[in-house]
Image: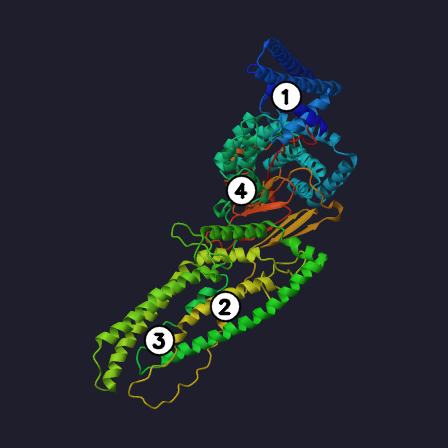
Amino acid sequence: MRIIMILFLITSFIDAITQAGHKKVASGNRATPTKNEIQSSMNEATGALRKELADLKKQLAETTDPEEKKSLEEQIAMLEKQLAMMGGLNKNLSAMSDKTIQDGLEEEAAESGVPKRDAIRINMLPKKVLNNAELFLFIKNVQASVEKIIPVAERTEALTFYNETKAQYKTASIVANAGTGLWLLGHWEKALFLMGKVCADDMHNADNLNNYAAFLIMTGGEQAAIPILEYLNSKYPDNSTILNNLGQAWFGLGAMENAKKYFNATIELYPNHSMANSTMANISLAGPNPDTPRAINFLKASLKGGYDPEKELELERLGYATNYDDLPAFNYPMKPDPFGLIPLLNSWPQKIQSNIDDPAPAYELQRYMNGVEELKREILDENAEIGKKLHEHGKKLVTDKIYNQEFMEPHNCPAHIQAVRTRYLLQMEEIQSGSGMPAQLLMPYFSPYTKSQKRPMSIYTILYYLKKFWITEVLEPMERLAVDAQHQNPLPNNCKEADAIANAYYAKRADIYNRGVDRIKKEFINKSDELKVWIFLELYATPDDQSNKGMGDAYALVDYLDEKIAKQSVENQTYEALLRFIESGKQYVNRLRSNCDQSGVPDPTQPAKDMKGYKVKRVECEYVKKIALPGIYTFELRCNTMYEKVNPKTKKRLPDIPKGAAEIASPRTQTVGPVSGRGPHTFYDAMYEENKYRPLCLESKEESQFGLEFDKWGKLIACNFQLSEDGTTLKDPDSIESGIDSRWSWNAIASPKKGYLNKLIIK
């Protein structure tokens, strides 16, 4: 760090005092300067300072003006300090080796966001696209060089994994997936070894070639990755995965124009490509004239491609406040009306008594409302018990650190994190909008309903609108009807005439009630999609105790009271809110009597309707995704939780390299085995297969395709997968499990700092 500071001071002084036309220390796209070049620039800058100092001293000797004399003395003192500091820096520079200076400047450049152009490694690259035979020899040479750099212990363990996996599974694709498993666990040396061996053994698989190149990029061997990627690009043009990896490789070499060319091509194919946009944001911010608005746009596109709190934090640093619309779609599968609210609302009788001689509708409504009251009381009692359990649960989280970790760790996954953030942003937007809606209806948040844009709407927001319909469609028309009847109807001469007038009024009143309740039911159904998204966010954002620890089968997200208390509370509260609204019709349960009936006999008490068929529906987890990698690593995403199993021989390592992003598809999209009669030295020409086997990419997905993205610390931050047209299931129901023979295509993310393989020699 001291070396970087010295070099920073040197370059800052030179840039500050050199005039237009004087040589700069380094330009954005040229190699880092040598020690001699820096010393030459320093001598030139020092000479300029001495000349300026001599001129000032001459002016001081000639002036007689006291004010001018004082100003000149101050300038002379400042220049003498600068010259003294330059002398000290020059002395420090003389003591440094050229290598130390180069490393320091490169580290300084890396901290600025982009690496300096590496002319040595760029000059290693072949001058043309390799053919099949040349590529085979090239990969063999790269693999041999990588093996020399990898520590002996890592190489020995990797060879054991390679031999055991190959003997057990017999196919190169599964051995390659074992390499991916090692990569995910942070064992980059073993992963590189296996992937290099696989590519040398079986040269026909474009995914393996691409993945080997991606791993090389992320470990600093960009110079070894580019020839492989250029070969693939010639075979499979317009593939965003290949193009992104080429862009990342050129970025790692500091060749920004080439990097931007490939990133622009990637973004043209897939505008929200997370990796390409993220690196383009870094490029936009680098140099003496950073383009902040352009960087913000790239970061927003990257965020749309995969939610990452770090991207949002970077946007905040750049002065941009992320909002709900900036987030990617929360497109996890879920059945329509997951709580079963529509059948409950539809159970509301639309008939009230319309004739004094027919009390049946009044009795039916009374029985129904009694059932609603019973169901509501049952839910309230249940919620009281849930509240106690939640209180005890909260105390346990605070006092029992082991339980706290077991509870929280599974929720440290993309679905839960994005749901929490999405819900928060919606809450903040409503607070900032200054809505005048009653506070009790803002729980958990309110989002204005507009026809142009469907946004999540809470049950409380929807009920707010339905109450308005109840007032405008039922209460106000009935009030007008009563006033009109009072003024327009003549006074009856007897009770029979009074009954006739009453029946005419009651028939109109019943019609208003029927049309009002029907309108409310239709409006509720119209808003059910927005409500479904709100339910999504509530369930996924609510951490719940998982009774089934470990890697068991799929199980209910919300199940029994003693197991899934937090989410059950969400469902119960939602159900109770709708029941309270339905009770708006309670005022119409009383039987209407004839004006001729003076008996005073009370109405019989009506039993409560059995509402068990409408009891709160417990939601099962609609999304379970299992990913297995041969003998190395397995993990399951179960809605808002994630569980992992790791081979004891390969414990997870703290990442010291980026992991990138991967596209995964089911085995049926996997490339076939080696073609009969072709040796491993000949690349299988898949062009006649109409590009069927090109690496998976975001813009052209298989039905079974599933995407993962990792942040720079190696943490899983985003999942992307194919849903059916109605969003209720995975597009390919058979793709719940990605087995050990699944197909993987990796998107690299380059680091501005030189990686472990930057000294890799290629031939």
Image quarter in which the C terminus is found? top right
Image quarter in which the N terminus is found? top right
Up-down relation of residue 640 to residue 137 (above or below): below
Colour option used: rainbow
Tell me the element at label 1: helix
> Which label's residue is closer to the chain start, 3 or 1?
1
> Which label's residue is closer to the chain start, 3 or 2?
3
Identify the amino acid type marked 4: Leu
Q: Are marks 4 and 3 in contact (CB under 8 Å)?
A: no
- Seen at 51% across and 43% down, the residue is 321
Tell me the element at label 3: loop
Q: How far apart are marks 3 and 2 (CA)?
A: 23 Å
Q: Which of 691 and 753 is in front in this view?
A: 753
Q: Distance between the residues labelled 4 and 3?
A: 53 Å
272 left or right of 503? right
Crowding at dot 1, Cα within 10 Å, few <14 / some 14-19 / many 20+, comes out as: some
Residue 28, horizontal then vertical, whole percent: 58, 23
Q: Which of 493 and 608 is in front in this view?
A: 493
Q: Distance between the residues labelled 3 and 1?
A: 89 Å
Up-down relation of residue 605 to residue 443 (above or below): below
Crowding at dot 3, Cα within 10 Å, few <14 / some 14-19 / many 20+, comes out as: many
- Determine which residue is flagged by label 1: 13
- Label ID, residue 576: 2
